[in-house]
């Protein structure tokens, strides 16, 4: 069965307890279950990852690029969290690995602090979903499949 990688950046391991008024009460484990259910319904498996370390996320994107080229992976659903607004390195990794990425954010970053309004990821992403809560992950998976498999 083909795979989709779901990458989660820093502090997303705190979902369910960190600022629930902004991010909701669902945990990262709940998000993983949602992603697996959504992907399975579309005929895909999920490789679900979370890291608080930028370099580890870069390594996973490089790995994803190789898997896409070999046909073992459709693409990546990526919530880069705070690295969205700071990481040129993640931008360069996505561009360099030529991996299709759907950028996803649980909250609507455009209604929050001004520093969250700019994304280094969006310009190299295949699509962007913001502000739909954890359901944004399911939308991103469906969108990735629709966009790439039509």
Image (tube, rainbow, N blue to C red):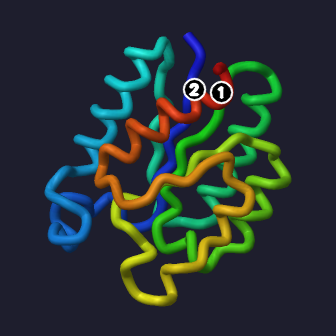
Q: Is residue 104 left or right of residue 97?
A: left
Q: What residue is drawn where x is 57% and y is 77%?
A: 85
Between 115 and 12, the one lying in front of the other is: 115
Residue linked to disc 2: 145
Q: Quadrant of the N terminus?
A: top right
Q: What residue is drawn where x is 47% and y is 44%?
A: 49
Between 109 and 60, the one lying in front of the other is: 109
The extreme bottom residue here reads 114
Query: From the viewer's perspective, is residue 108 above or below residue 33?
Result: below
Q: Is residue 128 left or right of residue 130?
A: right
Q: What residue is drawn where x is 65% and y is 27%?
A: 74
Residue linked to disc 1: 74
**Residue 64 sits in which quadrant?**
top right
* x then y, percent, for residue 127: 61, 48
| In contact (CB < 8 Å): disc 1 and disc 2 | yes
Q: CA distance from mark 1 to mark 2?
A: 8 Å
Callout 2 crowding tier (Cα within 10 Å): few <14, some 14–19, many ≥20: some
Query: From the viewer's perspective, is residue 66 above or below residue 15?
Result: above
The image shows a total of numbered marks equal to 2
* x then y, percent, for residue 130: 43, 59
**Residue 17 sits in which quadrant?**
bottom left
The extreme right residue here reads 96
Callout 1 crowding tier (Cα within 10 Å): few <14, some 14–19, many ≥20: many
């Amino acid at each position: 069965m083909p795979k989709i990688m779901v990458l989660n950046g820093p502090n997303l391991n705190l979902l369910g307890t960190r600022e629930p008024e902004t991010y909701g009460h669902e945990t990262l484990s709940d998000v993983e279950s949602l992603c697996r259910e959504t992907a399975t319904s579309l005929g895909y498996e999920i490789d679900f990852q979370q890291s608080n370390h930028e370099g580890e996320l870069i390594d996973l994107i490089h790995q994803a690029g190789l898997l896409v080229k070999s046909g073992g992976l459709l693409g990546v659903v990526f919530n880069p969290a705070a690295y969205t607004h700071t990481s040129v390195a993640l931008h360069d990794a996505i561009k360099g690995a030529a991996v299709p990425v759907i950028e996803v954010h649980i909250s609507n970053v455009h209604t929050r602090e001004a520093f969250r309004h700019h994304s280094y990821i969006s310009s190299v992403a295949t699509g962007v979903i913001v502000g739909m809560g954890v359901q944004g992950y399911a939308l991103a998976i469906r969108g990735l499949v629709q966009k790439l498999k039509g």
